[in-house]
Amino acid sequence: MACCDEELIGKTLSEGELFFEVKEKFYKGFEVSEEKLAELLKQAENANLVGKKTVGTALKEGLISKNSIRLIQSIPHVQIFKL
């Protein structure tokens, strides 16, 4: 599952040698509410999340810890893998 804050689609984030593209073909899909995102994240086997709202939902639901969040140009990014 891939999800990002809508305003980040098509943006390129870089910090030092780190370069991250929020590609439309990977992240663009359908818009969901915070409640629906929480439900989808709980069911997902893995997730790639970008943005304050999106990552904030995962944090609020207890699916990630603050230590797992990487900031790129002050934009949070996290990956979740269930084993």
Image (cartoon, rainbow, N blue to C red):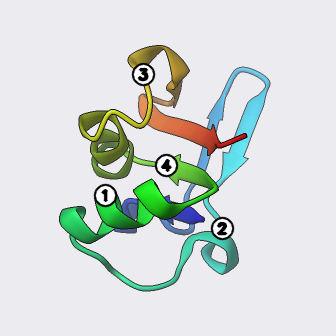
Q: Nearer the viewer, mark 3 or mark 2?
A: 3
Residue 23: image tag = 2
Which residue matches tag 3? Answer: 65
Residue 50: image tag = 4
Q: Position of residue 63 (x, y in %)?
A: 41, 37
C-alpha span from label 1 to label 2: 22 Å
C-alpha span from label 1 to label 3: 15 Å
Q: Position of residue 54 (x, y in %)?
A: 36, 52
- Relative horizontal placement of residue 81, taking residue 70 as reference (left or right): right
C-alpha span from label 2 to label 4: 11 Å
Q: Residue at x 58, y 70 (%)?
A: 27
Which residue matches tag 1? Answer: 38
Q: Tags 1 and 3 in contact by the CB under 8 Å rule?
A: no
Position above or below: 27 against 58: below
Q: Amino acid at mark 2?
A: Lys
Q: Residue at x 37, y 68 (%)?
A: 6
C-alpha span from label 3 to label 4: 15 Å
Q: Secondary structure at mark 1?
A: helix
In primary-sequence order, the first of circles 3 and 4 is: 4
Q: Amino acid at mark 1?
A: Ala
Q: Quadrant of the N terminus?
A: bottom right
Q: Tags 3 and 2 in contact by the CB under 8 Å rule?
A: no
Crowding near the residue tagged with mark 2, few <14, some 14–19, many ≥20 C-alpha atoms within 10 Å: few
Q: Amino acid at mark 3?
A: Ser
Which residue is outermost to the top? 67
Crowding near the residue tagged with mark 4, few <14, some 14–19, many ≥20 C-alpha atoms within 10 Å: many
In primary-sequence order, the first of circles 2 and 4 is: 2
